[in-house]
Image (tube, rainbow, N blue to C red):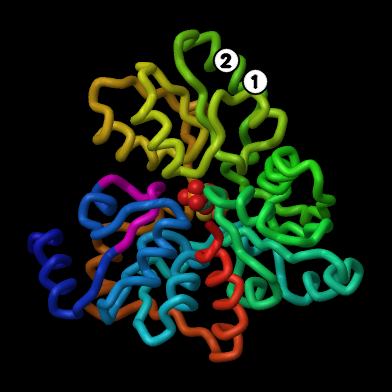
Amino acid sequence: MDIKKEILRLKEERNAIIVAHLYQDGEIQDIADMVGDSFELSRYCAATDKDVIVFCGVHFMAESAKILSPQKTVLLPALDAGCPMANMANAEDLKKLKAKYPEAAVVCYVNTTAAVKAECDICCTSSIAVKVVRSLPNKQILFLPDRNLGQYIAKQVPEKEFIFWPGFCPTHNALTTMHVEEARTAYPNAVLAIHPEAPPEVVDMADFVGSTKQIIDFCTQSDKQEFIIGTEEGILHQLKLKNPEKKFYMLKYRFICPNMKKTTMELLYESLRDMKHEITLDEETIRKASLSLERMLKVK
Ligand code: 13P
Ligand code: SF4
């Protein structure tokens, strides 16, 4: 069986689109209709007129697609592809914290469960986090779950007071200043681009900080030839496709999100063949969580 052909055939039969996050394996990115960062994928899924969205990414991303398009069938090929950071926040603890800070706007990173989004005022992704926080009238911001991204935003918006949740991404949080020192010594002419999920002392050493898509755009538009990349290595696929003449070095050896790597061509095929694994959410959660996601999509 030619698995690529079968996936494309089933995609037509189901009137489906395949979307893939930039951390997915290259062959998954290549077969997808849309490859992007969390923000782009949310926007794309909200606008599609297809009946089925097959989400090659992790659970919270597929959930966001379902929240934004509740009438569509949303499938996650790898059932156990979760995000450990999203699982570090829960709605019960958030309700208690909100009661302690009644004046605060609750801003949640899109890397949260639908139940947590339902308790937030507005969502953000790393690409528009600073804009989202600046758009709010509140002086106090309760930011969750990524304390590293939270601290990065706080530095850009010093006029606000922040309350951070103690969450983090195990993949990005493993970066240290030593990784930067070693990479700078090995590649003295390279420019360092880092994702804001990295620890603050590492982010402070970067030449550029941004979401996955922003890192790709930065490297593509730059007239520099060498780059050290401080995010998951799946991003190299688009970086190399767009910049065949430039050199990219990973900031850390085996810089991998194990959950993003759970999607395979076989699981993608089975997902379309058997219509699995369908994301389901109750109506009330969708109603409440959609407010925070839609507010995010309206931020200019
Ligand atoms: P982006 O929005 O930059 O794609 O980030 C998503 C993510 O999970 C990073 O770890
Ligand atoms: Fe979650 Fe980190 Fe993986 Fe992104 S890289 S999906 S934040 S665990």
For badge 2, the amino acid type reads: Glu
**Residue occupying the far right of the picture:** 100
Frontmost residue, 84 versus 208: 208
Q: Residue at x 29, y 78 (%)?
A: 52
- Whether residue 157 is situated above or below residue 108 in the rendered picture: above
Q: Residue at x 45, y 40 (%)?
A: 214
Does the magenta portion include 160? no
Confirm or deny contact between disc 2 and disc 1 (CB under 8 A): yes
x and y percentages locating residue 15 in the rendered image: 19, 78
Give the residue at mark 1. Answer: 178
Frontmost residue, 55 versus 257: 55
Tell me: 111 left or right of 215. Answer: right
Tell me: 275 left or right of 253. Answer: left
Q: Residue at x 22, y 67 (%)?
A: 269
- Magenta region: 19-26
Q: Residue at x 35, y 58 (%)?
A: 263
The part of the image, by quadrant, that contains residue 234 is: top left
Tell me: 59 left or right of 137. Answer: left
Give the residue at mark 2. Answer: 182
x and y percentages locating residue 282 in the rendered image: 55, 89
x and y percentages locating residue 73 in the rendered image: 35, 82
x and y percentages locating residue 29 in the rendered image: 28, 51
The 10 Å Cα crowd at callout 1, few under 14, some 14 to 19, many 20 or more, is few
Does the magenta portion include 21? yes
For badge 1, the amino acid type reads: Met
